Image (cartoon, grey):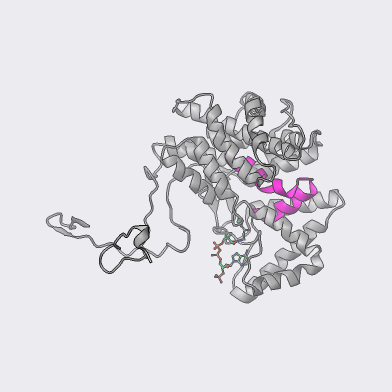
Amino acid sequence: MIAMSAEGSALQPWVESPAPDTKNVGLRGVPVADTMVSDVDGQGGRLIYRGYDIRDLAERSTYEEVVYLLIYQVLPTASELATFGARLAEGRALSPALVNMIRALHPETPTMAALQSMVAALAAFDPFPGDAGVQAERERAVDLVAKTAGLVAAWHRIHRRLDPVGPSPHLSHAADFLRMVHDAEPDAELARELDIALILHADHSMNASTFTARAVASTRASLYASASAALGALSGDLHGGANARVMEMLQQVGSPDNAERFVREAFASGGRVMGMGHAVYRTDDPRAVILREMSRRAGEARGDPVWYRTTERIEKVTRQVFRETKQADIYPNVDMYSASLYHVIGLPTDLFTPVFAISRVAGWSAHVIEERFAEAADKPQLYRPASEYVGRYCGPESCAYEPPEARS
Ligand SMILES: CC(C)(COP(=O)(O)OP(=O)(O)OC[C@H]1O[C@@H](n2cnc3c(N)ncnc32)[C@H](O)[C@@H]1OP(=O)(O)O)[C@@H](O)C(=O)NCCC(=O)NCCS
């Protein structure tokens, strides 16, 4: 490559300025876009959605308010909130065609894979196909948030050979999701516990699934394409899949007394303790702090404290062993205590990661809208990072192609 010299006079061979070696650290700390959606303060242990601290939102708001805030950029008035709640309830309903598509999936399909394919299929049911304006995209986003809960609940029942349950306009998104799963209205406390969990998972700046959603949106692919790609990213064990892995770990460990041996063995074999550690937080993850207390209370209130206590012991020992072996601190992340919480509130483990998705789809949507429509935000037209080719050449030239029959 050649480029103008600094003086602009002569063409010089292009010399790459030495870039920091970020290639094996997954772009840690490399800003790729501006965002007005959320801020993660990794040193201070704070998470902000459009200016509001999640600790306030978890204490005082509802998931509906948070979705509105993320998608419309402001908190709703009382009447806007009432209309919005009704709109979400309406959107949770699935058409017979969608239900038939769910029925056509093999019952052994992993729930996240089923959800990913159904979200991609929503493109076929878009009520405003071809409308590329921001209002239409917001409408799409609201419908997507609503439908994601409807799809997870319907899949849960259909693959257990039960009939899906339609939405109720009188319930919150969290309460209605539980009702559509269990075919029974949850008590107010249970519904609020899930509501808070949904608030806490709704966005988290440029995490792997959000980055995926934004990269797809930057190609001008649809919201459904972005969200289904993000669902694939979320499903992995190092991301949203971790909450289900934490539950499996808790079942394997069984009681606080076995925690130390489990953790020491995990470290000795080079394994990772699921639910511990974070790419950004270097202090307590504020979501984990809230979920820890919720898990403790929920376990005690339901006479089933072993899951909380086992998690707490695993956390303590992991911190101790991490300090011994790496001379550093490690903290629980959002998945550590959501697992025991979800378990004691009666959610099956295969719904843990989908519940994460039911919430995070609001954040993905807000980021996709920002990627597509926020003119002021500094972001690439199209994400296109570089790679260094370390594969083979045949000498200075590329390799000579030979037809299959000539190959030895
Ligand atoms: C989330 C996670 C991927 C972040 O990883 P990361 O950014 O690579 O973390 P770091 O680079 O700061 O890791 C530093 C060291 O801590 C170790 N480490 C990080 N998380 C660990 C864990 N949960 N258990 C044991 N060791 C861990 C790494 O192996 C690394 O060790 P090394 O330097 O000897 O190679 C990682 O903490 C992890 O795998 N956690 C478990 C999965 C999980 O809970 N995911 C949900 C995230 S919200």
- Per the picture, the main secondary structure of the magenta-coloured stretch is helix
User: What percent of the width, then of the height, locates residue 311?
Assistant: 74, 60
What is the magenta range?
A: 334-361
Whether 340 is among the magenta residues is yes
Locate residue 71 relative to residue 188 in the image: left or right. left
Which residue is at 22% across, 60% downward? 14
Relative to residue 136, is residue 333 drawn left or right?
right
Is residue 145 located in the magenta-colored stretch of the structure? no
Ligand 1 falls in quadrant: bottom right
Q: Quadrant of the C terminus?
A: bottom left
Compared to 188, does 400 lie above or below? Answer: below
Q: Quadrant of residue 98?
A: top right
Q: Residue furthest front?
A: 405
Q: Position of residue 297 (x, y in %)?
A: 80, 51
Would you say 2 lies left or right of 384 here?
left
Q: Is residue 238 visible?
A: yes
For the point 50% across and 24% down, the residue is 128
- x and y, in percent, of residue 15 in the image: 24, 62
Q: Is residue 282 above or below residue 211?
A: below
Residue closer to the observer: 215 or 73: 215
Q: Is residue 97 above or below residue 382?
A: above
Position of the N terminus by quadrant: bottom left
